[in-house]
Every structure is written in structure tokens, then in C-alpha cells.
Amino acid sequence: MRATGGPEAAVGDVLLSVENVSLSFGGVKAVSDVSFDIRKGEIRAIIGPNGAGKTSMLNVINGFYHPQHGRITFKGETRARMRPHEAAYGGIARTFQNVALFRGMTALDNIMAGRTLKMHTSFFWQLFRYGPAMREEVDHRHRVEEIIDFLKIQEIRRVPVGRLPYGLQKRVELGRALAMEPELLLLDEPMAGMNLEEKEDMSRFVLDVNDHYGTTIALIEHDMGVVMDLSDRVVVLDHGIKIADGTPDEVKRNQAVIDAYLGVAH
Amino acid sequence: MGLLYQIFIDPFVQMGTAPDLFVQTLWEGLVGGMLYALIALGFVLIFKASGVFNFAQGIMVVFAALTLVGLYNVGVPAFLALGLSIAVMFVLAFTVERVVLRPLVNQPDIILFMATFGITYFLIGFGEFVFGGDPKVMITDQLYLPKGTITYKALGGVVSLQKLDIAAAIIASIMVAGLAVFFSKTRIGRALRAVADSHSAALSVGISLEQIWVIVWFAAGLVALVTGIFWGARSDVSFALDVIALKALPVLILGGFTSIPGAIVGGLIIGIGEKLGEFYWGPLIGGGTDAWFAYVIALVFLLFRPQGLFGERIIERV
């Protein structure tokens, strides 16, 4: 449970709402009839056992998958189909369960790539890397350096990310998402495969992002301890169905959740 | 013994005793190699950004040159024809993305590769239909490309350089340097590399795959146009030209499929190797080596560096 009354108290209006979303692949139902909302400024966790449909849910939110039924409303706008780069344009950034970085590029270039949508000079200037294009590069570089400082990855700026250890790759990926200055940040298992120390660092960064930038965060996580510490509200999925929704304490006491995690005698 | 002497000693003795001929051969190899490099560059651009081996690159060279000459022949002024050809290459890039790549997105690479065969045969048929199948002469004079030769008395003999080749070398270098800066230092360049590395990650930061594909195919089309102009100036502009595209294969094997510098260096090595082989070792087996010598060079190279000169070594955890 998080301490209340901190700067994150600005939790307010609904930023994104998912209504009756169903998604299936052929005969396999990944998500069925799930509804929940994410409020501005909160940290919202999506948890559930393996195969519960958490990542599918995230992919629906950022437009990788198109649900067969249901609606998604983001910033008051409902869209039937949204493509990933449109989601990015609307202010949704994400990280991936199995780090998806641009492996051949340096950490700096990866984060700069996150600025793509914020940069507007035309193809023509870009071609000559002159005038407005040059000024723009410099401006955005400043912002990126701030993010690099924030995530404490100054010393690995110039290292191709393929060579970095896993924990740092995850951090660079977070940096790339932050560079988009998103309104909604989706984190798919940000601490998967990390040791305790790395998990603590990452938790700190997630909280700091929420406090410092006021970014709304939706995260998927397996580690229950982490989820309980970080999140304001939790939605629990099991076999594609929503079984609980509420504060960490409420969810922890919910019998359906306990059954899903520990199993029930049949 | 005599044979070994002919293979391993005699050619080098000849190089030493007639340095003018050696330099001349070297220069010709360099020029040929540069054109190979340009073709390979077209392949690399597309392969880097979309992972597609574009079989149609060779035909794009012919098609671009044919468009230029064809437009001029129906009375369009030369530089307007050049501009229109560039526009045609853009339309081609746009159409390929819309009609071929977009419906096949997420299909296995081999499907996309086969689709480029389709593009190849479409371009051959369409080109012949519009411009006719007869060989045409490149409009070098009208584009103010220099002609004639510069002759040096040097090294105890005469070395002559074609001015056209020198112009080709200069223009190609400018183009390659420009592309290199564009790729490494700009937003669109970064987006291109990002798409090459991971499609889903690129999408998540808001890069539009469609837009990037149009840009790379257009860039490859421009490279094809430049290649077509200079290659067409050396022979005729006809569909027979597309055989040279096959020479890009050994270049790519040498340079790696993903490296721009690799394409350049690989092209030069193949070009020079081919000419030297033809001139000094060719007579031993009755000539005719130029059709296959490039592949032998590539094969020998593969034995020692399977990832190519500059190719990224792929290490996978299993």
C-alpha cells in the first residue's frame, strides 16, 4: 500500500476506459468481456496467473491487437480500431515483456528514437541535416539527457544496447518510453527476471516517474509484493475474465483471487 | 612446375614490369566495382529497413534508366525527364508499399522475397509495354555529363581515364556520404534503423512502418536511377542490364547484407578482383572469366568470414 497524501494525490478523472472487451485468436479466448478504467495520475496494476490475458489486454490498449467486441475510450475519444503508431501519437507509450530495444543502436539513439513523434522538421531538412533539423536535434538531445540523468544511465549512453546487461536494457527501454512524454505509460512486467536489488531500483523509478512527471502508469507484474507496494488500484484477470478490481488490500482479501493464485480443490 | 609459375609468379612479374597496364586495369576495376557497389547499396537499403531481399533491385535500375531515356525520346527536355523519373521512382515506391508490402506484412521473409520476383516481372512487362523492348542510348550529353578521356603519360606508358567514370565516382561518393549522414544523424534515419531492429518496438514509439518503407524504397529507387544513368552510359539501356544485378550478390556476401560501408568496400573488391583476374589470370584458361570470377572471390571469402566483411555477427542464445 502506498502512503496517501503524497504528490500523487492528484488521482482524478478517468483517462482510459475499457468496456466489455473480448479478444480471441481463432477458437482461443484471450480476453472475454473485460471492463475497467484507468484514472489520471494513478498507478494501475493488472495482475493474474500465467495465461490470464494480461499482455493481450495491454496489446489491445496500445493498438497491437484489435478486439472483436467492446470499446476503448482514451481521453474521452472512443475508437474501434487504433493502430500502434496512432496510439503512440495519442500519448500512449509502452515497454515490452521481453525487452524490445533497437539492439544495434546506442542507448542514446534508442531514447532519441522515442522522440520521433515530437520532431517535426521535414524530410527535406533532414536530408541535409541543416537549419531547422539541426536545431531540433539539439533541443531534443537536451530533453533526452534529462531522462538519462533521471534514470542514472549516463555512463552507458554510447554503448550499443545489445551489449548491456538485462536490467540496464529494461531501464533504457523505460527511458525510450519516457522520451515520448506519454500521458499513459504501459509497463509489461518491468521487473521480470530481475534480482532483488534491480527490482527495488526499478520500483523506485516507476514511483518517481509517477511523482515527478505525473504520468499515469498501467503495469503488469508477477511479483505480488511489488504490486502491493506500487499500485493504487489493481485489476485481476484469470483465464481472460476479470475476477477482481480494487485497492491492493481489497484484492488481497478477495476469495476469487486467492483461489486463482493458490488453486482450489475441485 | 611451369603451370605453378604461370599462376603464382608470372602475373605479379607482369604487374611489376608494366605498371601502366596494372594501374589501368586497377582503375577499370575500380569503376566497375563502384557500379556494383551502387547496386548492392540499393539492396542493403531495403534489406536493412524491411528485412526483404529485393530481387527487383536490378530491374529497378533498368526501369529507372528506361524511364529517363524514354521520356526524353518522346520530347521531354532532359532535366525535366530527370525530375519526372525521380517522381516515377517515388510513385513506384508508394505503389510497392501499398500493393505488395502492406498486404503481406508479418508474412515470412520468403513470401516477401517471392513477391519481389513478382515486382521484377511486372516491371519488365510494364517497361517493355510503355517504352518498347529495343535498346536505347543514354542521354549523357543532354545531362551535361562529361565525355572523352584524360590521358596521362605515366609509369613508362599511358594511362587513360574516362571523364564519365570520374564523374560517376564523384557523384556516387557524394550520394553515399549523404546517405551515411542521413542514416546516422537524423530522425528519419534513426527511425529507419529502428524499424530494421524491431518492428514492434518501432511501432510503440510511433514510427509508421508504411512511411518508412516508402522512404527506403524511394531511396533505393534514387540509387537505382543514378546507377542506371552511369551503367547505361557504358553500354545501352536495355533489359539485358539486369544481369549485372546478379553481380550484386557476391558483393553482398562480401560486405554483409546490412552494412552500407560493406556494400561499398565489397563492390570495389569484387570490381577490382574481377578485372585483375580477367587480365592477368584469364588468358591461362582462355578468358571468359568475368562471368564467374566474382562468385569465386565471394566463395573464398565465405570460408573465412561467413558473416561478411562488416556484417553483424549473429550470436543467438539457444
Image (tube, rainbow, N blue to C red):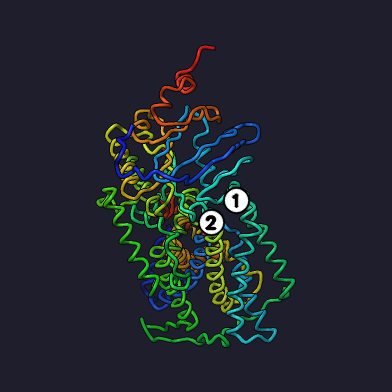
Q: Nearer the viewer, residue A24 or A16?
A: A16
Where is residue A87? Give x, y as percent. Answer: 51, 51
Q: Report x, y in % for residue A65.
A: 57, 43
Counting other residues with Cα less than 10 Å from the Cα at mark 2, is it few (<14), some (14-19), or many (20 or more)?
many
Q: Kindly identify the amino acid type of the residue bearing the numbered disc 2.
A: Leu
Query: Does B108 sit above or below residue A242?
Result: below
- Residue A121 in view (yes/no): yes
Q: Residue at x 49, y 64 (%)?
A: B41
Does any portion of residue A164 appear in the rendered image? no
A170 and B295: which one is in front?
A: A170
Q: Kindly identify the amino acid type of the residue bearing the numbered disc 1.
A: Val
The residue located at (69%, 62%) in the rendering is B121
What residue does disc 1 label? B105
The residue nearer to you, when weighing B11 against A35, is A35
Label 1 packing within 10 angstroms: few (<14), some (14-19), many (20+): some
* Occupied quadrant, residue B139: bottom right
Q: Which residue is mark 2?
A: B209
Q: Chain of mark 2?
A: B
